[in-house]
Amino acid sequence: TSHDMMRLPLFTKAHGTTRRALNRSPVGSTFRFLATASGTGCSTSSRTERPRRSLFSVPGADQRFITKAQGLKADAVVLDLEDGVAYDRKHAARDLVQQTLLDSSQNFGSAELCVRINGLDTRDLALRDLEAVLPCNRLQAVVLPKVESASDVLFVSRMIDALCEDRDVRIIAAIESAMGFLNLREIAETAKDETSKAKLDALVFASEDFCADIEATRTESANEMLYARSQLVIAAKAFGLQAIDMVHINFRDLDELKMECEGGRQMGFTGKQAIHPAQIDIINDRFAPSTKELDFASRTVQEYEQTTTNGQGACVVDGIVVDMPVYKWAKKIVERAAKAGML
């Protein structure tokens, strides 16, 4: 509406357009405008990787859950304005999440503080969500649901540039549909976009929405999602992104959660979504290197670096031939262990 467009003065200033032009345009046109606007870029390689073994979602309309999340050990806490909030509570939830971000006495410890906004298909809701949370200094990442095209990510990137000044607010994109997977390469490639400071940092697999979209039958084995999960990991790793695995919906079955974590990690996922406090410690443990893995990786790095210094191209550690590919794997294990506080 015209009233909502009048609430976006920073867009006008940041992108050189006129308020009159914004008022003439529907919200969808504003999305396209901001997605193609130019800005100043920065390299993703220069940024510190944030640990996201566990991505814990909290309903943004419930202060009790928000308070409880402050005492947990999730790597990232996601204040949810989307599916976790009934439609008639959207405005109240937005106000509560904004208040939480502004109130420094609400201490989430070392957790990355994120907000999942409503999907861009909701237009008005999404715009108001972004308007409310982006100026808050404690916001560290926006979780963008229902991403189906690169322009979705680029739009939010331009919004962050306009409203967050020089703060390092990152984007976590949830892939939830067949169309999202068809366009996955282009979506992931936005991480290399040099026209904006705000960057895509991770991809999330939204299993339940995906199964609903393709009309798959949900099973305990999750075989129906193997192809999609593999696709997401490959796209993420190709463009230097983290890959966050699906929610384990049977939150009471912790043994099954452990197996699902192991499977996800074997596929290359770097973390997993959590919906219950009991899941967090298990996810953190399973997505961190084991003591045995870390010991082998540390010795592999040390032996290989010493060997190559002496002019040789490979060495043997515990009967395993270590060449450059094995060294790269071991180096990543050691780096992730350091970020998880294990070294």
Image (tube, rainbow, N blue to C red):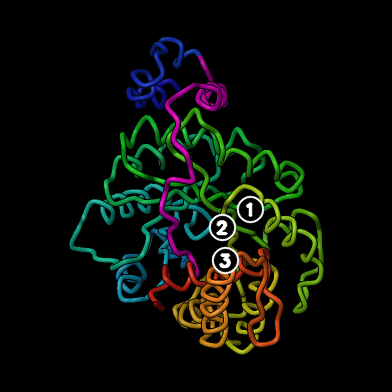
Task: Give the number of the disc on residue 242.
Answer: 2
Q: Earlier in the sequence, mark 3 or mark 2?
A: 2
Is disc 2 placed on a helix, strand or loop?
strand
Query: Alpha-carbon distance for marks 1 and 2?
Result: 6 Å
Query: Alpha-carbon distance for marks 3 and 2?
Result: 6 Å
Residue pictured at 46% horizontal, 11% vertical: 21
Tell me: residue 188, above or below residue 325: above
Q: Name the residue under label 1.
A: 236
Q: Residues within 10 Å of mark 3 (few under 14, many from 20)?
A: many
Residue pictured at 50% horizontal, 25% vertical: 34
- Give the residues in magenta: 25-54
Q: Name the residue under label 3.
A: 270
Q: Residues within 10 Å of mark 2 (few under 14, many from 20)?
A: many
Tell me: residue 252, above or below residue 16: below
Residue 68: name its quadrant.
bottom left
Circle 1: residue type: Ala
Circle 3: residue type: Thr
Query: Alpha-carbon distance for marks 3 and 1?
Result: 10 Å
Circle 2: residue type: Gln
Residue 22 visible? The answer is yes
Residue 245: name its quadrant.
bottom right
Where is residue 261 drawn, in percent x and y? 62, 77
Q: Which of marks 1 and 2 is nearer the N terminus?
A: 1
Q: How crowded is mark 1: few (under 14 residues within 10 Å), some or many (20 or more)?
A: many
Along the horizontal axis of the image, is 237 left or right of 92? Answer: right
- Residue placed farthest to the left in the image? 105
